Image: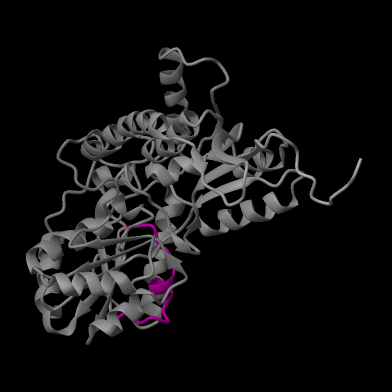
Amino acid sequence: MDVGKPIRETRGIDIPLSVRAFRFHADEIKALKGQVVDVPGKHLFDYVTYEPYGVVGSIAPWNFPLHLLTRSIGAALAAGNTVVCKAATITPVTAQLLGEVFQEAGVPAGVYNVVSGSGAIVGEELLASDDVAMVALTGSEPVGRRLMEASAQANRIKKLSLELGGKSAMIAAKDCDLNGAVNSAILGFCYNQGEVCVSTSRLLLADEIYDRFMDSMITRLGQMRIGDCLDENTQMGSLVSASHRDSVQGFVDRAVREGATVRVGGAPLTGGIYDKGFYYPPTVVEGVTRDMEIFQEEVFGPVLAVTRFKTLDEAVDLANATRFALGAAIFSEDPRTLYWTAEKLDAGTVWMNCVAKSNIETPFGGNRNSGIGREDGTEGLLEYLKVKNHIMYVAPEYDDFYGFKG
């Protein structure tokens, strides 16, 4: 109800993944060990330990206000930090309810703190405070840039973990399993109403299968059940706000003005239940070229930009032709094609014959303008720990490096 996503997704994905995040990090911190390092030279004993930063500011995203928050604070708390969470401005209820869960579980006061308010007030205070040692953000590229600027300007330069925007491409090679690839393409841009950082919102389609693929996808999109988020049969719910719906519409309108064509969708849904939310149908825009805004910029809604390609080299070049590098997907029935393409795609995650998959147990994050650092996995846990090296001299007598006498 906070976001507008279907309840079947919340029960089947958001809640289980949030529980899993706490369990994984609780186990992983127990498995983390320091190191004794064999260094050259006599009489030296060198060992490495990990320590918490102290207070971590966690800026929660609005699209997954529980799942993406718990993967951050689960790691931060397991590492021994305390957390001040800035709830997303437009979805503050979920983070507050999580605070009640912490209270009910008997977590000591001050371990998890949640504050609602705008980024201009609460977020800026987290960045300015000398008491906050680290800030973690899942959000947009502009906000990530602001965090980097503020950290540099603050009295205390802060450690940052930034998971920012994406413009992920899905490549459908001529030898892909058409049925599976079509289903994945739909999931890739319709899941959570397209309000997903790893949404595969660019479809790169081989010429040989273009018409069959598009016809099949358009037919299936016509069967999508869009409606009340509390209806168990709903497959797509409402966008998060009226202003965001208008933003999505703006991308579509500008794409048409640039020469693209709307194959299906392209306008908000109205009447009946649709007047009680901000509903937008699955929208497919074809004839998209790399110089168009809709190819380059994150729409964050159920809008798919489709581009043809002739060779796999061309497809890889197109996939890498944005400033974002969060995720990318390749569909083919040839394992060699999957491996070769995955090696050449610049992305933090490459999916092969699937889309938008992530696991708490494995690292997640982006390259280039999609972020700094990683969440999830051992790598994600280490983001919330300082590394300290210890060098002990264990010779029977102290070194006399300069050869002093007396």
Q: Position of residue 167 (x, y in %)?
A: 38, 65
> Is 234 situated above or below 203?
above
The count of marks equals 0
Does the magenta run of residues contain 293?
A: yes
Locate residue 77, reporting x and y percent: 49, 29
At x 37%, y 49%, the residue is: 363
Residue, far front: 406
- Residue 234 lies left or right of residue 108; in this view the side is left
Q: Is residue 294 above or below residue 16?
A: below
Dominant secondary structure (helix, strand or loop) of the stretch shown in magenta: loop
Q: Is residue 97 above or below residue 103?
A: below
Estimate the x, y position of residue 36 in percent, counting from the top left.
51, 40
Q: Position of residue 284 (x, y in %)?
A: 25, 68
Q: Is residue 62 visible?
A: no
Give the quadrant of the N terminus. Answer: top left
Q: Quadrant of residue 106?
A: top left
Q: Is residue 13 above or below residue 226?
A: above
Q: Which residue is more in the foreground, 75 or 186?
A: 75
Of residue 94 and residue 22, the one placed in the foreground of this image is: 22
For the question of whether residue 105 can be seen, the reply is: yes
**Magenta-drawn segment:** 287-301
| Quadrant in which the C terminus appears | top right
